[in-house]
Image (tube, rainbow, N blue to C red):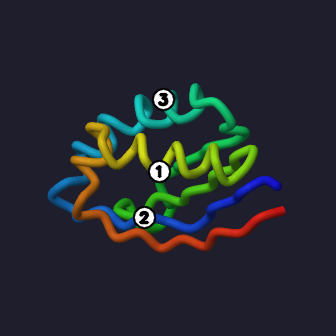
């Protein structure tokens, strides 16, 4: 059963440039993960500090592996102050 996570992150304004400068690498690293079916993070058109997120993984094992990788990655370190608002569901 696929796992889908959707929502947004809200980045503190003083960390915005760091996040933007490292976002492409984070996206590419995630797309290269085994079991990643779709992954998009796009800056909102009305609030520059909000990034809309959509993730789709083959199953819960692939999703969990992604979560663990991110926790120990550079991306995980630079986004520790980011507010995350997500909804996770399976299909």
Cα distance, mark 2 to mark 3?
A: 18 Å
| Mark 2 crowd level (few <14, some 14–19, many ≥20, 10 Å Cα) | many
Q: Say the numbered circle drawn on residue 9.
A: 2
Q: Which residue is mark 3?
A: 29
Could you tell me which residue is drawn at 50 percent across and 60 percent down? 44
Left or right: residue 91 compared with residue 68: right
Q: Say the numbered circle drawn on residue 67.
A: 1
Could you tell me which residue is drawn at 30 percent across and 64 percent down? 82
Per the image, label 3 sits on a secondary structure element best described as helix
Q: Nearer the viewer, mark 3 or mark 1?
A: 1
Say whether marks 1 and 2 touch (CB < 8 Å): no
Per the image, label 2 sits on a secondary structure element best described as strand
Q: Nearer the viewer, mark 2 or mark 3?
A: 3
Res 91 → quadrant: bottom right
Could you tell me which residue is drawn at 69 percent across and 42 percent down? 38
Please tell me which of labels 3 and 1 falls first in the chain: 3
Residue 85: percent from left, percent from top: 47, 73
Cα distance, mark 3 to mark 1?
A: 12 Å
């Amino acid at each position: 059963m696929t796992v889908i996570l959707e929502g947004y992150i809200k980045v503190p304004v003083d960390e915005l440039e760091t996040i933007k400068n490292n976002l492409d690498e984070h996206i590419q690293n995630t797309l290269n993960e085994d079991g990643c079916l779709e992954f998009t993070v796009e800056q909102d058109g009305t609030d520059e500090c909000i990034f809309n997120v959509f993730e789709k993984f083959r199953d819960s094992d692939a999703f969990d592996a992604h979560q663990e990788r991110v926790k120990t990655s550079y991306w995980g370190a630079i986004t520790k102050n980011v507010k995350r608002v997500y909804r996770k569901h399976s299909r």
